[in-house]
Image: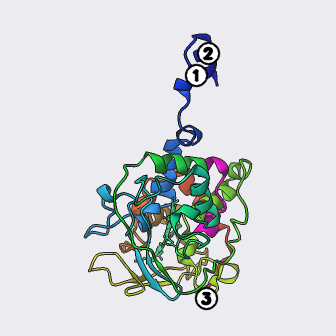
Amino acid sequence: MTAIRLALSLGIATAALVVPASAAAGDIDRGRYLVNSVMACGNCHTAKDSEARPIRSRHLAGGGVVWDVPPFAGMAPNITPDRDTGIGRWSDEEIRRALTQGERPAHRGLAGVPLGAPMPVNLYKALTRADQDAIVAYLRSVPAVRNPVAAATRRAPVKRALYPDAERAYGAADLQDPVRRGAYLAALAHCMECHTPSSPQGSLYGTAMGLGGKAFAPPAITGFPEWWKGTVSRNITPHPEFGIGRWSDAEVKRAIREGVSRDGRRLSPPMPFESYAEMTEADLDALVAWLRSLPPRP
Ligand code: HEC
Ligand code: HEC
């Protein structure tokens, strides 16, 4: 605003200051932090190297994880700004609707077909408007990579269970409270999507949130290196015996950020600790405070 007034007073044509709405609206640094760290989009949308680390030159270009589960067979698409194989032609509103509603624009060629179950839009409903804009701004700033990704096969209608901490977008006041902020970060980081067992109707958030026991293994999930034979998520409720109740805050944070369990064991994919590594100390503290507020479940 001040820049525009200054420009006017200097007699500079304001047209020169009209940057595309997409670039002006969102905070790119905040978007980079959310996409690459907290939300770990690349865990699904970026191809991996032989160490299961995302390949930089393929950042967000699709084909990271491949699912072959009863409702869905295929992989995460290219979400770089490439106009033909990515989301370069999508409007800001179309990207926001995909993220928070799971809707695809008509010009995508799959009009009316909701995004497949692996894309955690039920949790992304929590996103504040400012964070949606930040994500859009950052996605527009990454290098466009040409990489056509074959459309997925949908074998059944998409079913997503309502996530109790993401029934609506959060507001600024929510984010002031440490535990609410932790709940917000956990929704965005989709911790409970992996750490909650599911039925054909979706994850059992109401009765088994954080209980772990969800299996990830080929052939249902591939796209990881040969050495990866699969794993099972753990109980991360505050249960003293079966969960993280006796872990110190530092031990929980080390697991999230460094992928090391309490006993020193290395955690394996798909736990996205490589992304979470960049999370700020304050955000990790909020996340741990929220985890400790959950009902302990054996
Ligand atoms: C757990 C895996 C997973 C995560 C995490 C994930 N996505 Fe997705 N995403 C998918 C899958 C799978 C699809 C495709 C679904 C389909 O084809 O129906 C998808 C689709 C999309 C689409 C629609 C693209 C198109 O061409 O139709 C966009 C946009 C998108 N994701 C953006 C994001 C962003 C931004 C993030 C992080 C904030 C993210 N996704 C995190 C798995 C994921
Ligand atoms: C894409 C799936 C996925 C996501 C997202 C995910 N995890 Fe995990 N997590 C796993 C799996 C699988 C394991 C077990 C890995 C192993 O044992 O090799 C694990 C392990 C852990 C452990 C170690 C538990 C133990 O007993 O060793 C903790 C703590 C943990 N996750 C917390 C979190 C938190 C907090 C979040 C969100 C910030 C999160 N996870 C997000 C899949 C996931």
Seen from the viewer's position, the closer of residues 49 and 9 is 9
Span of residues in magenta: 120-131
Q: Is residue 224 above or below residue 35?
A: below
At x 45% / y 55%, what residue is drawn? 36
At x 55% / y 43%, what residue is drawn? 22
Mark 1 residue element? helix
Mark 3 or mark 1: which comes first in sequence?
1
Seen from the viewer's position, the closer of residues 134 and 197 is 134
Residue 232, percent from left and from top = 45, 83
Instruction: Tell me if 58 is positioned left or right of 237 in this view.
Output: left
Which numbered marker is on residue 199?
A: 3
Mark 3 or mark 2: which comes first in sequence?
2
Seen from the viewer's position, the closer of residues 63 and 48 is 63
* Circle 2 Cα neighbour tier, 10 Å, few/some/many (<14 / 14–19 / ≥20): few
Which numbered marker is on residue 14?
A: 1
Mark 2 residue element? helix
For the residues labelled 1 and 2, say whether their Cβ atoms are less than 8 Å apart. yes
Query: Which residue is the site of mark 2?
Result: 8
> For the residues carrying marks 3 and 1, which lies nearer the camera in this image?
1
Q: Is residue 1 above or below residue 201?
A: above
